[in-house]
Amino acid sequence: MTTAKTIDPLDVYTDWSRRRARAVADETPRRDHRGAAPAVHAAIAERVEALRPELVALASDLHAHPEVGFEEVRSASRIADLLDAHGAAVERSAFGLPTAFRATRGSTGPHFAVVAEYDALPGIGHACGHNIIAAIAVGAFLAVPDAIGDGRVSIIGAPAEESGGGKELILRAGGFDDVDAAGMVHPSTGDDVSPILGGGTSGVRRLTATYHGRAGHAALSPYLGLNALDAVVTAYQSIALLRQHILPVDRIHGIITDGGAAANVVPERAAAEFLIRSDDIDTLDVLVERVVGILEAAALSTGTRLELDLDFAPPYLPLRPNVALTTRWAAALERRGRVVPPRSRVPRQGGPSTDMGNVSWFVPSIHPSLGLGGAPGVLPHNAAFAETTVQPAAFDALVDAAIALAGAAADYLADEDLRADVDREFAATGGRRRVGS
């Protein structure tokens, strides 16, 4: 028999509140690193501007031919062909993933990886702007090698960010084992620019709950049935009640995927899928335990059997941007005439997740965002946002972002003191850590 358990989050939630208050008090943006020489940054800007027509064509082509996660055959090939055309030796089907790729320039010294995404959303295409992400990554990768001496830069093409955890699969395959730092840029709405501080994302874990009951005639003998739909509804409503008593940054959302076959038959099978998010690993684990307890209790209360599939896709860890490295992105972007706020003007209240979070727990990483100039109310994961990605303002943002990402990479490769600070910050926040470790 399934036995539900009670989870008291008091200690973890209290510790979260203390750490959050301490982090806000202690955070001070730093901008005092030397970085690469001004001539290097000028060369990067000139190189990316020269690449503008090809980067715009790439972003437009990916937009016109969207492919969902693990099916990005054309997209990955299109990007790899462009890299090949510029002399990069591209490893296709890298890391055991048919739509992943990698290319590296340089053979010694510190190693910075630029990360590309290119999967689309079902039905609404590139409504998260991954066509722009890919073009930014290509521009940054092709610009940095012209400006570095002793150092390596890679581009890692990671499939299935939206749901499949491609970067986590690449991590498991050792794809980041020789990387010292990594970065990518995500598009956002309007003229938004992510702050130097507080630019993290939520971690997410996914589960499906399938309840198995016993069919019965809903009119003649309902008392002989065990209603699996009742179990799903009980679980769904109980999770809705839980939402009042979770952290303000936490999110739980789900859908009923199977509610039975006929209204006059007691449903013997019903199912639901839930996504569970929090901005800290410990609080995410506690929230998952609370949700699982509810799912088990729903089975107990209805006499049904719960089949639980937890982490049917790799968990996404909360993103922890490296502040020392983010300051170099900010400095490079401000040279393009854009203003980067030191910290967010509003308290964080939950948000999306990315498998770049997993990378950020393994190597020092940045994942800033830059608005594409669309209407403020047009947000990612809306079909209208996909159209925003192929407007002139979006292409200007693409170029600026590629220059700034390349600038941050060049600073990292050129400045030993910066690398030391990046590593110290990374070690102070926990160092290398994989999912489940």
Image (cartoon, rainbow, N blue to C red):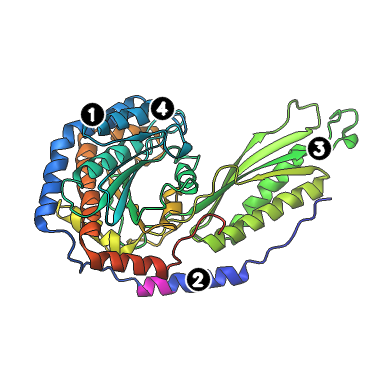
Dot 4: element: helix
Most common secondary structure along the magenta stretch? helix
* Separation (CA) of disc 4 from disc 1: 18 Å
Query: Which amino acid, by three-letter code, is at mark 1?
Result: Ala
Identify the mark nearer the N-term, 2 or 3. Answer: 2
Question: Which mark is nearer the camera, 3 or 1?
Answer: 1
Q: Residue at 55% across / 63% down in the picture?
A: 282
| Quadrant of the image containing the C terminus | bottom right
* Separation (CA) of disc 4 from disc 2: 45 Å
Identify the mark nearer the N-term, 4 or 3. Answer: 4
Query: Which amino acid, by three-letter code, is at mark 4?
Result: Val
Identify the mark nearer the N-term, 4 or 2. Answer: 2
Q: Which residues are magenta?
A: 22-26
Evaluate whether residue 188 shows in this view. no
* Separation (CA) of disc 3 from disc 1: 54 Å
Residue 12 against residue 120 in the figure, above or below:
below
Dot 1: element: helix
Query: Which amino acid, by three-letter code, is at mark 3?
Result: Gly
Residue pointed to by mark 2: 17
Residue pointed to by mark 1: 57
> 10 Å neighbourhood of mark 2: few (<14), some, or many (≥20)?
few
Evaluate whether residue 170 shows in this view. yes
Q: Is residue 81 left or right of residue 218?
A: left
Dot 2: element: helix
Residues at marks 4 and 1 touching, judged by CB atoms closer than 8 Å: no
Q: Is residue 74 left or right of residue 437?
A: left
Residue pointed to by mark 4: 73
Question: Which mark is nearer the camera, 4 or 2?
Answer: 4
Depth check, front residue: 74 or 102: 102
Identify the mark nearer the N-term, 1 or 2. Answer: 2
Identify the mark nearer the N-term, 3 or 1. Answer: 1
